[in-house]
């Protein structure tokens, strides 16, 4: 039996009340996945990432969504937010909290949204991330039965963040989940959405998530993806964004956990005034592998994109960055900037980076670049001269390197979580902000 067939054997039976379009799309996803199978390193888009740990795995499906409340409270972000909680892909109503959600905003589990408004969901789900995008979106389509749907009516502004918490348990048998996230933002609406991936330290599951974001005229979405999964978890994510006139999408892709992680981000700027910001930071250690593939399609004139990704790699970790900006022939007077900088903390760490510009217009402002280096030993010495021990000096310089991305993070709880992961827990007598400022000054001196 082939690997695709082994995975598809886990497909649940069709529900009797399931809409026909759901069944048809699942069949299409399963057929496509069985036909093409898992990607290999012979595929150009996957040449640096080996997914055999997924393909060779034997993953079941979760049968319940139980999770200890005290443990959850100790893990969740210290943030006042509306939240939906999923455990191994299954909705947990007890840990979720949507109290006070403003009129004009709807946040629901996907299963509930389909039951209540199947026609509206069917017209949008899978529109951007179809079965042909990758084997993993095809697999997701075959198994799609849960996730989150966020709908904002025109003019709706949600002041508090909307947090989608994806928990991974340490199961006796590893499980897989295929959450779908659908965000539909009406004209001039605004919200902050967080996808937070975390769980138990011994978890060794496979998460395959697909997020689709539809922005109408003037809509603004700040999207945070904070990935803190177990160092044994396998994580594949695909985010697709459709932008109309004067809309803004700001992405914060922060990867800290996972044994194998792949992030695909695709934004289509389809009308004048559309803006996209890609802010990324990946911090990997041990034998972690993180692969970031980004694509911005400038499909209309006078659109803007700015991308800044930074990688910090220690031990024998491996990072990949492949960022592409595509400018269509009639997309004149656009601006597109892309940068990838990487810091290697070990001689054994490895980064493969490939920024790309594909331009078919002549009246544009575009630039891209990539750098890779190590800590400045003179800067380490400069901090030690100020009474800071060597491990702390190296941690602070590492955090200062990440500062350009972290300065864009508007949510303190997320920034603090990432800073602690990068720099470690500092003694109480130290003020983190002051020390980072000192480290940046030493580097510039």
Image (spheres, rainbow, N blue to C red):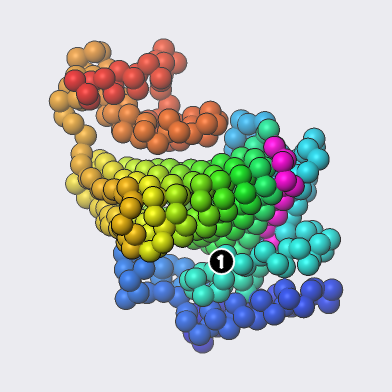
Q: Is residue 244 above or below residue 130?
A: above
Is 149 covered by the magenta stretch? yes
Q: In this view, does 391 lie above or below 189?
A: above
Q: In which quarter of the image is residue 47?
A: bottom left
**Horizontal placement of 416 versus 344: left or right?**
right
Neighbours of disc 1 within 10 Å: few (<14), some (14-19), many (20+): many
Q: How far from the left and from the top, in percent, is residue 83? A: 70, 42
Q: Quadrant of residue 389?
A: top left
**Horizontal placement of 104 versus 316: left or right?**
right
Q: Residue furthest left?
A: 378
Q: Which residue is drawn at 41% across and 74% down?
A: 39
Q: Is residue 421 above or below residue 14?
A: above
Can you see residue 114? no
In-front residue for pair 243/347: 243
Residue corresponding to mark 1: 129
Q: What stretch is highlighted in magenta?
A: 146-158
Q: How far from the left and from the top, in percent, is residue 295? A: 42, 58
């Amino acid at each position: 039996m082939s690997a695709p067939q082994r995975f598809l054997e886990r497909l649940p039976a069709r529900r009797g009340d399931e809409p026909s379009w759901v069944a048809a799309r699942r069949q299409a996803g399963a057929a496509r996945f069985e036909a093409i199978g898992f990607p290999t390193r012979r595929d150009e888009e996957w040449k640096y990432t080996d997914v055999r740990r997924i393909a060779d795995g034997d993953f079941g499906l979760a049968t319940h969504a139980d999770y200890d409340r005290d443990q959850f409270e100790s893990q969740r972000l210290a943030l006042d937010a509306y939240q939906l909680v999923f455990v191994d892909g299954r909705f947990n109503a007890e840990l979720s909290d949507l109290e006070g959600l403003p009129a004009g905003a709807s946040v629901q589990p996907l299963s509930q949204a389909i039951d209540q408004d199947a026609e509206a969901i069917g017209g949008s789900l899978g529109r951007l991330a179809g079965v042909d995008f990758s084997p993993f979106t095809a697999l997701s389509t075959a198994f799609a039965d849960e996730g989150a749907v966020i709908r904002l009516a025109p003019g709706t502004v949600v002041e508090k963040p909307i947090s989608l918490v994806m928990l991974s348990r340490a199961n006796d048998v590893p499980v897989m989940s295929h959450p779908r996230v659908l965000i539909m933002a009406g004209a001039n609406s605004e919200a902050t959405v967080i996808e937070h991936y975390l769980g138990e330290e011994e978890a060794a599951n496979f998460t395959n998530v697909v997020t689709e974001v539809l922005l109408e005229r003037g809509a603004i979405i700040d999207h945070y993806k904070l990935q803190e999964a177990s160092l044994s978890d396998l994580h594949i994510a695909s985010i697709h964004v459709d932008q109309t006139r004067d809309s803004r999408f700001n992405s914060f892709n922060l990867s800290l956990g996972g044994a194998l992680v792949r992030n695909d981000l695709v934004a289509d700027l389809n009308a004048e005034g559309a803006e996209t910001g890609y802010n990324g930071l990946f911090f990997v250690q041990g034998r972690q592998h993180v692969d970031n593939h980004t694509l911005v399609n400038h499909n209309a004139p006078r659109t803007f994109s700015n991308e800044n990704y930074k990688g910090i790699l220690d031990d024998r970790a491996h990072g990949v960055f492949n960022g592409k900006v595509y400018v269509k022939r009639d997309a004149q007077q656009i601006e597109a900037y892309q940068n990838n900088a990487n810091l290697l903390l070990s001689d054994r760490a490895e980064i493969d980076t490939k920024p790309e510009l594909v331009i078919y217009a002549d009246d544009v402002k575009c630039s891209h670049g990539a750098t890779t280096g190590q800590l400045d030993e003179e800067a380490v010495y400069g901090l030690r001269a100020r009474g800071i021990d060597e491990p702390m000096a190296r941690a602070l310089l590492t955090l200062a390197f990440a500062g350009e991305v972290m300065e864009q993070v508007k949510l303190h709880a997320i920034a603090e979580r990432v800073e602690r992961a990068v720099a470690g827990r500092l003694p109480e007598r130290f003020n983190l902000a002051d020390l980072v400022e000192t480290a940046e000054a030493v580097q510039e001196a």
